[in-house]
Image (spheres, coloured by chain):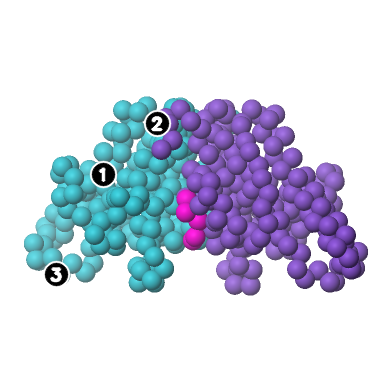
Chain colours: A purple, B cyan
Amino acid sequence: MRREGEPIRIMLGVNVSTLKGYTDVPYPYASISCTRAFEWTLQKIVRSNTSAFKLLFLYVHVPDEDSFDDMDCIYASPEDFKSMMSRDRVTGLHLLQYFVTRCHEIGVSCVSWIKTGDPKKVICHEVKRIQPDFLVLGNRGLGLFQRIFIRTVSDFCVKHAECPVITIRRRADEIPEDPADD
Amino acid sequence: MRREGEPIRIMLGVNVSTLKGYTDVPYPYASISCTRAFEWTLQKIVRSNTSAFKLLFLYVHVPDEDSFDDMDCIYASPEDFKSMMSRDRVTGLHLLQYFVTRCHEIGVSCVSWIKTGDPKKVICHEVKRIQPDFLVLGNRGLGLFQRIFIRTVSDFCVKHAECPVITIRRRADEIPEDPADD
């Protein structure tokens, strides 16, 4: 059991944007929906009570199984895999650095880590292992028709994660031309 | 737009327990899951930062359409309906009084109100009208098989409410013999 004065631990799943060049920040940067989920958590939950909460950022690196159409990247030697692996690790570090820096500026304590696998399963597995007080996830806010084809990570986690889950939709003015983008 | 210093408004849907006599409090009292959702909100979100939040309690009175098997209650005259109506109103007032009293003791500001209709639809309608920052609902934590037969209010609101929704499951030691009870 946690003691009375210890911070409430809020886990956030973060991922990369599918849109290049929509901000001035060099790519890769965080997706619109996970950025929104982070800002929402600060504005609506943490507020000025920074010492009462701790944010736990998880980035899940997805193994690049079917990227034969990505012609910049031909895996012909163990070295190619190594460079791909290190590239993906850099992506994760980039994202986590952004969130950790923001937390330090605001004065909220945080930790961040990278795992590899299927994001929805890894997030649920990490919830079980870490036991956060609750989980905040961004959500593209897709309609029912789109969701039949695009089963979202947040839908899965709402059903299966062993802690309360709150999903935060993007604001209407943030939704890109193709709402499946993020 | 709300100003910076104004409290974050957290809406909670509350309902009556289906179990009589499991506490010393006279029936009707709040369901296990909505009591848990309330306690969770205090412990995990509000904490000692009581002035930063305002709790909005909604009780939805369900019109008693098919209660012919309830032999204590035969509707033979307009007066019978009137007494039924007033009984249900008392139920709602009982519940809201409990939550409002708790909030006053703790020093969190709150409001509460009663609406009539289908709880899931009324909650979503009230979210649209009131625009809370988020909605907290209790959840019995039923398995997939049970949920096919018992479509829960929280499942519906997670999909349809126009604000973020967090559902709070009962603790394992709170689940009654029949988990459909609450």
| Circle 1 Cα neighbour tier, 10 Å, few/some/many (<14 / 14–19 / ≥20) | many
The residue tagged with tag 3: helix, strand or loop? loop
Quadrant (top left/top right/bottom left/bottom right) for the N terminus of chain A: top left
**Residue A163 visible in the displayed image:** yes
Tell me where residue A151 appears, x and y as whole percent: 61, 67
Kind of element beneath mark 1:
helix
- Residue B55: x percent and y percent? 41, 38
Q: Which residues are magenta?
A: A158-163
Q: Amino acid at mark 2?
A: Ser
Q: Which residue is mark 1?
A: B95
Q: Chain of mark 2?
A: B
Label 2 and label 1: CA atoms lie apart by 17 Å
Question: In the image, what residue occupies the spot 53% across and 50% down?
Answer: A129
Residue B153 location, x and y as percent? 39, 60
Give the labeled residue for mark 3: B69
Instruction: Give left or right: position of B55 versus A124.
Output: left
Mark 3, chain letter? B
Tell whether position A159 is magenta: yes
Counting residues from the start of the chain, the first of labels 2 and 1 encountered is 1
Q: Which residue is mark 2?
A: B109
Q: Are marks 3 and 2 in contact (CB under 8 Å)?
A: no
Query: Where does the image place residue B29, in percent across and percent down from the top left?
Result: 22, 47
Give whichever of A145, A52 is nearer the camera.
A52
Distance between the alpha carbons at the discs numbered 3 and 2: 41 Å
Which chain does the residue under circle 1 lie in?
A: B
Residue A117 versus residue A135 in the image, above or below? below
Sequence-first disc among 3 and 2:
3
- Pick whichever of labels 1 and 3 is earlier in the sequence: 3
Residue type pointed to by label 1: Leu
Give the image quarter of residue A44: top right
Where on the picture, by quarter, is residue B10?
top left
